[in-house]
Image: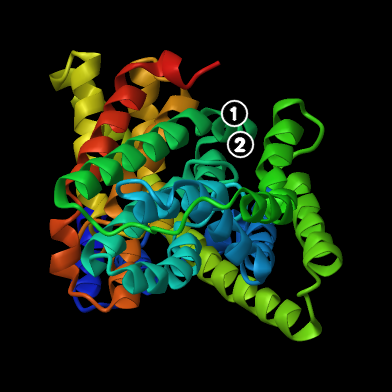
Amino acid sequence: MSALILFVFMGAAVTAMPIAHALLMAAMAAAASSERVPLDLLVQQMVAQVQSFPLIAIPFFMLTGSLMMGGRLGEALIGVLSTLIGRFHGGPAQVGVLSSTLFGGVSGSAVADASAIGSLLIPWHQRLGYPSAFSAATLAAAATIDILIPPSIPMILFALSANASIAALFVAGILPGLLMCGGFMLACWWVGKRRNFPRDTTPFDMPAFKRHLAYASPAVLLPVLIIVFLRFGIATPTEVAVLSTLYAGLVSAVIYRDLGWQRLGQAVVHAGLATGVVLLVIMASAAIGWLLTFDQMPQGIAAWVQANVHAAWLVVLLMNLLMLFLGMFIDLPAAVLLLTPVFVPLANAIGMDMTQLGIMMVVNLAIGLYTPPVGTTLFITSALARVKVGDTVRELGPFYLVAFLVLALVSYVPASILR
């Protein structure tokens, strides 16, 4: 049955069918071919997977991002960062990296980050005469910091699948996210200096910087509040998501005064549609995961690895290679839900903490978001910059190097993320 699932899924995926539909088709084909699996039981498993209280956090975090970045906050944030570092080598690109890092504390979605930040920054880069391909590459890679800095939707999905702590994952993702940010900024500086990219030559204006900083500070405070509430157990992740939406609404309506009924409606519709896509992927992945578990494939893989691979570091390497490969072809939410049941037994066998496994998985699959052939953020930023995807990929070398270094740290130095 596992072989049939893989065959049908790959056959559907190569026809450019949406991943959720391909997963559903594979699940239904496998269930129909087996007399041991009643279809009604399969549907029950699909529905049961989304009857989860922590999942309520997903639409609220998405709505928070839409409210905060859909108005004047985005412009204020860009103004602060461009005034601060836009004059340095690679400064305009570094502004994109820092913007994605700060936006990571609001949204939790790399796709939302790439769309929002890219639409604001790419036209500014082009007015400066910045290479469009490098701009698209920077923002495609930087957008993935969003899913490491809490809140993170993929971490919520992993926690639900592995029965891990969402709060522990959120806290553990901070250091890798900051290291990724610092490494990407260093790469932007090095490339900008070596190739003498244009910079923002406007003299530093301290009064303007203070105005921008004061204007953006209520929004910059949000990720700090999220971490404090989670770290000290003041609220659960779901409660934090609801509170962050209320905070975003109040800040937009009272401080920025740009939240009208029309923009509120657009934000709700956008969050609802994005949540619907995620939930469909969750349901389809739940069906596949239940069938694979019913067929005892995860246990079989774990038994084979334990019998043939005796070094823990080699098991970690194999998991990384498999995640990197599958991340190139499968959307991140689906990959998390499909791979977690397979890797949890392996992690338990070598004594790996679930929090470390979750962060390692998110870093791995994040790289797939800007790696062809199905790199979501790669295609978004390339389309916004109006450049060929191949041109963008050629500029990604330094960012891949940084990402692999962070991945190695997370994979082999668990003390760097576990507290």
The residue beneath circle 1 is: 168
- State the count of labels: 2
The kind of secondary structure element at disc 2 is helix
| Amino acid type, label 1 | Ala
- Locate residue 189 relative to residue 91 in the image: left or right: left
Identify the image quadrant of residue 383: bottom left
Identify the image quadrant of residue 268: bottom right
Contact check, label 1 and label 2, Cβ < 8 Å: yes
Instruction: Count residues near mark 1 (Cα–Cα under 10 Å), then give few for <14, some for 14-19, many for 20+.
Output: some
At which x and y percent is residue 166? 61, 36
| Amino acid type, label 2 | Ile
At which x and y percent is residue 15? 20, 79
| Extreme-front residue of the structure | 203
Location of residue 116 with respect to 227 vertically, above or below: below
The residue beneath circle 2 is: 166
Location of residue 222 with respect to 303 vertically, above or below: below
The kind of secondary structure element at disc 1 is helix
Viewer-side residue, 327 vs 262: 262
Q: What colour-coding does the image apply? A: rainbow
| Extreme-bottom residue of the structure | 262
